[in-house]
């Protein structure tokens, strides 16, 4: 009397991290990148821009790294110190977010197309 033994299946690792879907960047991160880019274009040190804006270098650094969620007054002060209008700065951030959104959605569409082709 032979019993049939089912083949072994690999164990499912439920602790393995799941790939996270592409996420659009936060506004404060894109703002910070733009502020840092403008400051670098001017060839300024953090302390120089911060002094003109009336904020501490530490606070400006946190803004540039996307750590702080700055008030509109703080954003306007730093924008003024960098000789850009609040409108121009906001539009630049919005365009960066729009570009990121399009590339994120294109990536998902492309992945879906590859999955369908397989």
Image (cartoon, grey):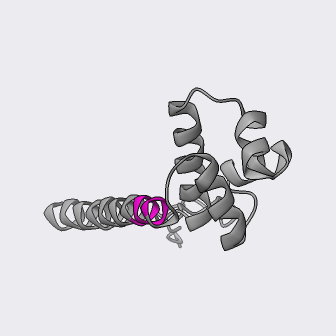
Number of numbered callouts drawn: 0
Q: In which quarter of the image is the C terminus?
A: bottom left
> Is residue 40 a member of the stretch shown in magenta?
no
Q: In this view, does 106 lie to the left or right of 97?
A: left
Q: Can residue 64 be seen in this view?
A: yes
Q: Residue furthest left?
A: 117
Q: Does the magenta stretch include residue 93?
A: yes
Residue at 59% over, 38% down: 39
Picture layout, residue 118 above or below residue 34: below
Who's the residue at 18% across and 68% down the image? 116
| Residue 62: percent from left, percent from top | 77, 51
Q: Where is residue 68 in the image (x, y as percent from the top left)?
A: 75, 61
**Residue that sits furthest to the top in the current view:** 43
Identify the residue at horizontal 59%, vertical 55% (top origin). Answer: 79
> Can residue 12 be seen in the rendering of this structure?
no
Magenta stretch prevailing secondary structure = helix
Q: Is residue 20 left or right of residue 48?
A: left
Kindly identify the residue that appears in the image at 53 percent across and 72 percent down: 3
**Span shown in magenta:** 88-94
The one of 17 and 69 positioned closer to us in this rendering: 69
> Would residue 60 appear left or right of 26 to someone viewing this image?
right
């Amino acid at each position: 009397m032979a019993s049939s033994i089912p083949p072994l299946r690999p164990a499912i690792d439920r602790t393995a991290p799941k790939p996270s879907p592409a996420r659009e960047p936060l506004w404060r991160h894109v703002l910070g990148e733009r502020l840092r880019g403008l400051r670098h274009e001017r060839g300024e040190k953090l302390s120089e821009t911060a002094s003109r804006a009336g904020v501490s270098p530490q606070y400006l650094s946190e803004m540039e790294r996307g750590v702080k969620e700055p008030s509109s007054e703080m954003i306007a002060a730093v924008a003024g110190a960098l000789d850009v209008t609040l409108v121009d700065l906001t539009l630049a951030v919005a365009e960066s977010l729009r570009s990121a959104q399009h590339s994120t959605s294109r990536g998902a569409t492309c992945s879906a197309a590859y999955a369908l082709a397989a």
